[in-house]
Each structure stands twice: as structure tokens, then as C-alpha cells.
Amino acid sequence: MDLPHQGYRATKPRARAAPSAGDSVLFDDTSSAAPGMNSQGFYTPAYNMAGPSNDMQGGTGVNNLFADPMASAAMMYGSSLANQGKDMVNKEINRFMSVNKLKYFFAVDTRYVLKKLMILMFPYTHQDWEVRYHRDTPLTPRQDVNAPDLYIPTMAFITYILLAGMALGIQKRFSPEVLGLCASTALVWIIIEVLVMLLSLYLLTVHSDLSTFDLIAYSGYKYVGMIFTVLCGLMFGSDGYYVALAWSSCALMFFIVRSLKMKILPSISSDSMGMGSNSKHQLRLYITVATAVFQPIIIYWLTSHLVR
Amino acid sequence: MVCLRDKTSFASMAFTLYTLIQTAILCTNAIAVLHEERFLSKIGWGVDQGVGGFGDDPGVKAQILNLIRSVRTVMRVPLIIVNSACIILLLLFG
């Protein structure tokens, strides 16, 4: 007697379970049909949950986000307007400076930064100073340690400003406008140096591939020396300041001369040069040496008031 | 007393971006004022005396003369506008 009951009971829940299973199968069908509905090209993929459920449930459910067609149309218009604005801003920026060229200077990694900082502080053992090329385009800083970059100068500049604020605060001479003053002074000196370099390179018709960003990079490397000098001056007093100043000046002068010599001075193996080129060669040498000598002067000028 | 002296000693060597703009305007004015026939020809820096040898590299003097001539040609109208703006601003705000 039990067996038929059990069998009856076994079947009945299954029969009761069948419609609910059928309902869930129905719901599974709608959610699996959603990507199919989406591939017809709805407005944006963010709205795929709202759209098919709207259609599938028909008149039953208006309990979703974008029931109002006006709201969804407004959303679509707003997003297209934002995209247009973004494209316009990019176009305007590209008119002044090419963003691709700028991206080249920020393609760095940790290994490059560490090696470059070591070369800046101790360049005497570095052997090969050539910037390597790859089919006429210079290699990115990630692959070539001699390539100039803009990451180190930017970070060093910001660190220098913060360090100047800290040094002034230690001597109880700090006020917030001093930070802005320090920053704009350093920025103005960079601009002056880059403009003078560009002017002298133009006057002497040096056909090198030094772009403006390269010059900004090379003149921004002195901030690493400045940070080192200020730190030593703060930790070890006036004697430490002068020792660190001498050390970083020599290292930076060596670095600048070796780096710019490749770019500015012509290769020695050209025999077709006439007599008139001797003065040219001399003037180019003067420019390289003058750039190098300018670095310790500006380091002293910008850091001496921080360390008393 | 001490802090006042320190602050002024910092501010005396401080450049602002406004100083840079002023310097640029003054230098460009100075170059634009050089008259062609009254001054430059008299000292041998006229436009006809610039083009020397036709090698691949013009000399330093030719480059300087080119620069002066192009600054005078290109920057004449913008300098009028910028100088007028400077004068009005200085009159208004001192």
C-alpha cells in the first residue's frame, strides 16, 4: 500500500515542481535571449538589462529604470554630447602640442628610473652614451637608458617644491605663498634656459633632432641634483651643503656635456668640412660648455636661501 | 625683524610668470622698433646685406638678420594689441 502512495507522492511533487521549473526555464530563456536582443544594436550596453526585460514582460512590468522613452533619449543625447566635447578638447590640445610625442617621454618603468638616477648622480662609469634608434624612430625610455624622459624632471620639480617648503618650515620661515613663489621662480628659470638654448641652436643652425621637449628634459635633470644638495644641507649643515653642491655640480656637468656632445657637435669623421667650419665647431663647443657651467650656478642660486 | 628681512630677501630674487611676460613683451618691443633704413642699413645690418655665402649653413649674422626681419614682420600687429592692453591695464590697476 505504501508503494503506490509513495509512487503517487513521488510523482505529485514532481508535477507541482514542473510548472515552477517551467517558470524558471521561462526566465532563463529571457535572460539568455538578452544578448541576442542586444546584438541588434541597442543604445548602449549599460542599458541591456532594462531593455529586454521591458520587452519580455510586455505590459506587466513598468517597474524598471528607463520606462520613460524621453529619459532614455536624453541619456543617449547626453552621452553623445560628452563624446563630442571630449573629441573637441583633444583636437584643440593636439593643435598646440602633439600628445603622441609627449607620451613617448612618459613611457618609463622602474628599472629605467633607477638606472637614470644612478647615472645622474655618478655618471663617470657609464660607457655608452648613444641614443639608440629603431628604424629612424628613437627608442622609448623603457628600452634605452640614454633616452631623455620627462617623468624624472616632473617628479623632481614637484619634490623640490615640497622640499623647499619643508626647509623653510624647519627654519620657521614658511608661509603658503612662499611655495607658489618658489614654484614660479623655478619654472621661470627653466623657461629662460630652454628659450636661450633654442635661440642659440637656431642662430648656429645646428641641425640636430633636439626638440623642445628634449631640452626641457635635459634642463629638468638638474632638479635631482638640487634635491640631493638640499637634503644634505638639511641633514649635515652648511659643510654638507657645500660638499653635496660640489659633487652634484660635477656629476651634472659631466652628464650634460656627454649627453649633448652626441647631439650638438658634429661627428669628427667628416673630412669635407672647409676652414669656415672651425669657428662653427668652436661655437658649438661653447654652447655645450656654457650649458654645463650654467647648471651649478642655477643650483646654487635656487638652493642657497633654503640652507642657511 | 629677522623674519621680515628673510621674507624680503626671498622675494627680491623671486620671479613670477608676470615678470616673464613683461620681459618678453619688452624684448619683442625692442626688436620691433629697429627701423630698416634709418638704422639697420647704416650699421650694415640691412636686408640686402644679410644673404652672404650660399653654402648649406648661413652664418650667425645672416641668422640674426633673418630673425630681426621676421620678428618685425610677424609680430607687428600682435604687439600693437598687446601693448594697448598693457597700457590700459596699467592705467586702470597701476
Image (cartoon, grey):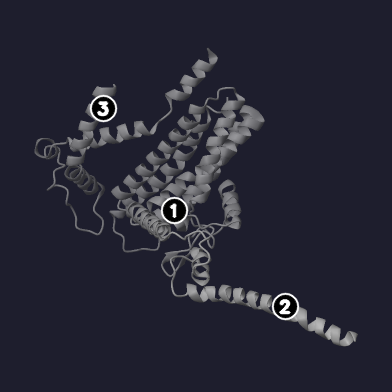
Instruction: Kindly state the secondary structure of the residue where label 3 is placed.
Output: helix
Instruction: Kindly state the secondary structure of the residue where label 2 is placed.
Output: helix
Kindly identify which chain the residue marked by label 1 belongs to. A
| Identity, as a three-letter code, of the amino acid under mark 3 | Leu
Residue pictured at 45% horizontal, 57% vertical: A103
Residue tagged 1: A261
Query: Where is A51 relative to B40, above or below?
Result: below
- The number of callouts visible is 3
Residue pictured at 35% horizontal, 42% vertical: A196
Residue A261 placed where, x, y %?
44, 53
Residue tagged 3: B89
Query: Where is A27 relative to A116, above or below?
Result: below
Residue pictured at 46% horizontal, 43% vertical: A292
Q: Give the Cα distance between marks 3 and 1.
A: 46 Å
| Identity, as a three-letter code, of the amino acid under mark 2 | Arg
Instruction: Kindly state the secondary structure of the residue where label 1 is placed.
Output: helix
